[in-house]
Amino acid sequence: MSEKLTIYFICGAGLGSSLACQMTAEDVLNRLGLDENLEHEAISSTPGLHADIIVSAENFAPQFKQYDLDPAIKFVFLHNIVDPSEIEAKLVPVIKELSAKAS
Amino acid sequence: MVVVNFIIQNILTQAAITIALIAMLGLLLQRKSFGAVLTGTFKTLLGFQVLSAGSAIIVTALTYFGKIFQHGFHLQGVVPSIEAINGQAMNTLGLGNEIALTFLGIFIVNILIARFSPWKYIFLTGQALLWMSTMTVIGGKMAGLSSVWTIVVGSVIGGIFAVAMPAIAQPFVRKITKGDAIALGHFCTIGYMVEAGAAWFFGERGEKKHSIEDIKLPKYMEFLQDTYLSVAVVMVPLFMITAAFAGPKYAGNGTSMNYIMNAFMMGIQFVVGVYVLLAGVRLLLGEIVPAFRGIAMKLVPNAKPALDCPVLFPFSPNAVILGFITTTIGTVIGMFLMPVFGLAVILPGMLTNFFAGGTAGIFGNVVGGRRGAIIGGIIHGLFITLLPALLVTALTSFGFVNASATDSDTIVAMLIYAWILTPILKAV
């Protein structure tokens, strides 16, 4: 079995909407039988995060460009951060790609 | 009996333990593994203690700010911050246990209403529930209720708000998201209704209605989406300017450091306090909220989760920035206006201005276009300055230091206690 991926969900304060997004994603991943480490944080804390994937809302996309982040981190930006089908369509392919590489 | 008494007096009076046990219960009900229950419970316990540490930092900075503001302007300056109110209520006033139990009670009442009424909203914004429990507990204690009744009444009032507020906002949320999948769970909803009303009255209609989303905003404004940065951008200069008026005697705080530099560091301390406190809240709620969600979804068929306001931000990002700016303008006008009416000086509370102001901007824009969002935003700013001003005297006499609450719905809940419940209890 391959290593679990670490996925961070990011919003402005790292409290409400990032957690809402994480819970929706957890449902999607459970349904598909994927088991990864899910965490949520504030955008101020992203420099220094050790993550494989960062998931955030579209409106934060320009913010991440200002940080000097590990180029290996994959980004997923969502329009509706609590829409299971959007999460499945955008996040799951990235997870599969990274898992395939690791194994 | 000795053992039971020991448990009651030494363990259950610790709010951190109470809230950790609530989290443990939620995790056990979900049949999580032993390891997950253990780490989840521990994280919640840790979160509460981190929150306390953050609160202590905020109080230090606020006490300093209150002193220099008073000597600089000869007025009482109040920082509206529900985080500071919560921290002080939990620690200084020792109401943590009541707040933790009311938090659980609100959730239970919320499920009951959702289960047996047509309003299927489950309020899942943990920190907003925490603020609501804080305010209802303070209200109950002020009205002279016993701890048990404080928790019972707080749970019922909070539970009603938890269903009513998403229900009121839903017609607008449908328009914003062009769907019915998301509900808004954020206790600033009365403020959003004020903005929507103002935007309808003053705004553009029909053919002439232009959405702010059709305009491209300057790039440099985007940094405002970073919560802590936008708090710092306003609070730090505010500390420094106030210190300049207060002079070295008061602003120096007895240190050898230059007094303006000292004020700068104190302003940073305030932001640090907010950061630490919210990090504590994140740990505290990271386990409880998903557990609540799991339980609620099982008990209430077709439940609709009501979520924190930033879920709406990607639908209307320009309106968020516009709402933040116009609400801030409104709160600045309000700061000068309140003393004219004999009320306390309420400083602009940047955290609320961003989240509530931004969301209010979305409501204003969807109802009344650009002009609606601008005029509505300023009126929203005035409204959210007036509300905490009404609370100051009561909160100060209860022992709070230089702070008042934010989040319109929690203040309205508290005013129900102060204006309706307390007079009734006194009359009986």
Image: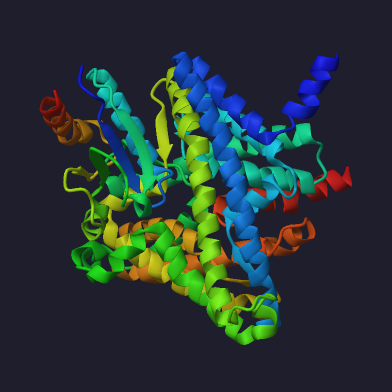
Q: Quadrant of residue B304?
A: top left
Residue B409: horizontal and vertical position, in percent?
56, 50
In the rendered view, tell whether residue A14 sits above or below residue B348: above
Residue at x 11%, y 25% (from the top left corner): A100
User: B148 or A33, which is in the foreground?
Assistant: A33
In the rendered view, tell whether residue A96 sits above or below residue B258: above
User: B277 or B205, which is in the foreground?
Assistant: B277
Residue at x 37%, y 61% (from the top left corner): B361
Q: Residue B417, can we see it? A: yes
Residue B270: horizontal and vertical position, in percent?
55, 63
User: A16 or B72, which is in the foreground?
Assistant: B72
Q: Quadrant of residue B302?
A: top left
Q: Quadrant of the C terminus of chain B?
A: top right
Tell whether A77 sits left or right of B421.
left
Q: Quadrant of the N terminus of chain B?
A: top right
Total marks placed: 0
Residue at x 37%, y 51% (from the top left corner): A45
Q: Quadrant of residue B60?
A: bottom right
Q: Residue B201, can we see it? A: no
Q: Residue furthest front?
A: B256
Tell whether B32 sits left or right of B13.
left
In the rendered view, tell whether residue B369 sits above or below residue B422: below
Q: How is the image coloured?
A: rainbow
Residue A22: horizontal and vertical position, in percent?
34, 34
Tell whether B46 sits left or right of B252.
left
Residue B53: horizontal and vertical position, in percent?
60, 49
